[in-house]
Image: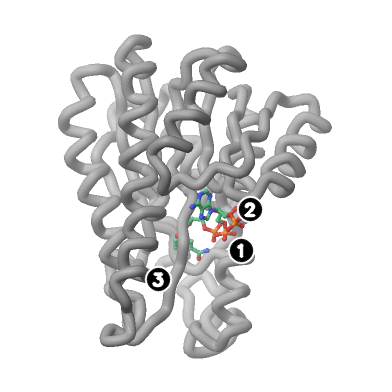
């Protein structure tokens, strides 16, 4: 991977996005960390820069707002130039009995988990077409492979992201751009621990780890490793794929 390439990682201030930002920086990319939370985006950028790599924080950005996406992409263009790698990772989880999902809750989940990636793809694909090379990785969810009770809205949004990935891959293949999705399963992040705290997992993290074929929860670094491969030169013949990273929970 050439050192000049820039990757934009949404939700890079926490959990899986944070690990992806660190890993891609270690692999030589310049990282634009986009997050709703300014402090966490800045902390992650500082941590990466302290290790001698290059990262820039763009906080206070809601991926579900088209105008904020376009603004931050303009800022990134001004500071870092064109972007060749996009990781759509920012996401919002949700647990509700089906009949309790209001229009507002449904719309918010769709806006963050599906419209956000749509906006970022539209904003950055022109850079990739111009370069004749690009990589897009969408972080979906293993729940979209299996279904998940009380998560109809979340699962529908992530299944939509898988469909977006497959269709966009067909359209962008001739441009030298690959589009893939990683549906993580059961990864130990603040999102998972919050769900555990609220009793939404149907058992503790340890209980579920015992039921997982590899007998441990996933680490954010597990997802980052798969993502690093998918954005590498070596992965140029892989596109439109759903690459599960879930300890064998979904096969
Ligand atoms: P996390 O620790 O909660 O991190 C998500 C990050 O996205 C946070 O920094 C959050 O910022 C940011 N974010 C949320 N809404 C945003 C918005 N509207 N605009 C910009 N940034 C926003 O969660 P995670 O577990 O790392 O999840 C990362 C991705 O993996 C998500 O798409 C999630 O659905 C998916 N996933 C995770 C698991 C798992 O087991 N952990 C399983 C399946 C799929 P704030 O902190 O300010 O909200």
Asked whether the beta carbons under mark 3 and mark 1 sit within 8 Å of each other, the answer is no
Counting from the top left corner in percent of width and height, residue 47 is at 78, 39
* In this rendering, the label closer to the viewer, 3 or 1: 1
Inspect this view and state whether residue 1 appears. Answer: no
Q: Nearer the viewer, residue 105 or 219?
A: 105
Q: Point out the tag, 2 or 1, that comes first from the N-terminus.
A: 2
- Residue 249's tag is 3
Q: Is mark 1 within 8 Å of ligand 1?
A: yes
Inspect this view and state whether residue 79 appears. Answer: yes
Counting from the top left corner in percent of width and height, residue 143 is at 34, 68
Question: What residue is shown with label 2?
Answer: 14
Query: Which of the 4 image quarters holds residue 245?
Result: bottom left
Q: Point out the tag, 3 or 1, that comes first from the N-terminus.
A: 1
At x 62% / y 83%, what residue is drawn?
Answer: 197
Asked whether the beta carbons under mark 3 and mark 2 sit within 8 Å of each other, the answer is no
Query: How far, Cα to Cα, is label 3 from label 1?
Result: 17 Å
Question: What residue is shown with label 1?
Answer: 189
Rate crowding at label 1 as few (under 14), some (14 to 19) or many (20 or more) other CA atoms within 10 Å.
Answer: some
> Which element is circle 3 on?
loop
Query: Which of the 4 image quarters holds residue 120?
Result: top left
Relative to 159, 1 lies left or right: right
Query: How many marks can you see?
Result: 3
Counting from the top left corner in percent of width and height, residue 26 is at 66, 30
At x 79% / y 25%, what residue is drawn?
Answer: 52
Rendered view: 98 above or below 189 = below
Q: Which of 45 and 122 is in front in this view?
A: 122
At x 76% / y 43%, what residue is drawn?
Answer: 43
Rendered view: 64 above or below 159 = above
């Amino acid at each position: 991977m050439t050192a000049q390439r820039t990757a934009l990682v949404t939700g890079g201030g926490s959990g899986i996005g944070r690990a992806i930002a660190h890993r891609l920086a270690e692999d030589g990319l310049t990282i634009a960390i986009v997050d709703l939370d300014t402090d966490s985006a800045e902390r992650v950028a500082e941590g990466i820069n302290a290790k001698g790599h290059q990262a820039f924080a763009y906080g206070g950005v809601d991926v579900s707002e088209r105008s904020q996406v376009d603004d931050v992409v303009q800022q990134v263009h001004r500071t870092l130039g064109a972007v060749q790698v996009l990781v759509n990772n920012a996401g919002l989880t949700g647990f509700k009995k089906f009949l309790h999902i209001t229009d507002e809750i449904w719309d918010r989940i769709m806006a963050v988990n599906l419209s956000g990636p749509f906006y970022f793809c539209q904003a950055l694909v022109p850079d990739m077409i111009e370069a004749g090379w690009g990589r897009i990785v969408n972080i979906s969810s293993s729940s979209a492979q299996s279904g998940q009770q009380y998560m109809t809205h979340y699962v529908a949004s992530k299944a939509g992201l898988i469909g977006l990935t497959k269709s966009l891959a067909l359209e962008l293949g001739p441009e030298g751009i690959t589009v893939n999705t990683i549906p993580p399963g059961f990864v130990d992040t603040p999102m998972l621990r919050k769900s555990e705290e609220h009793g939404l997992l149907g058992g503790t993290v340890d209980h579920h780890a015992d039921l997982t074929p590899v007998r441990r929860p996933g680490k954010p670094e597990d997802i980052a490793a798969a993502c690093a491969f998918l954005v590498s030169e070596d992965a140029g013949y892989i596109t439109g794929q759903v690459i599960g990273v879930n300890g064998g929970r979904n096969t």
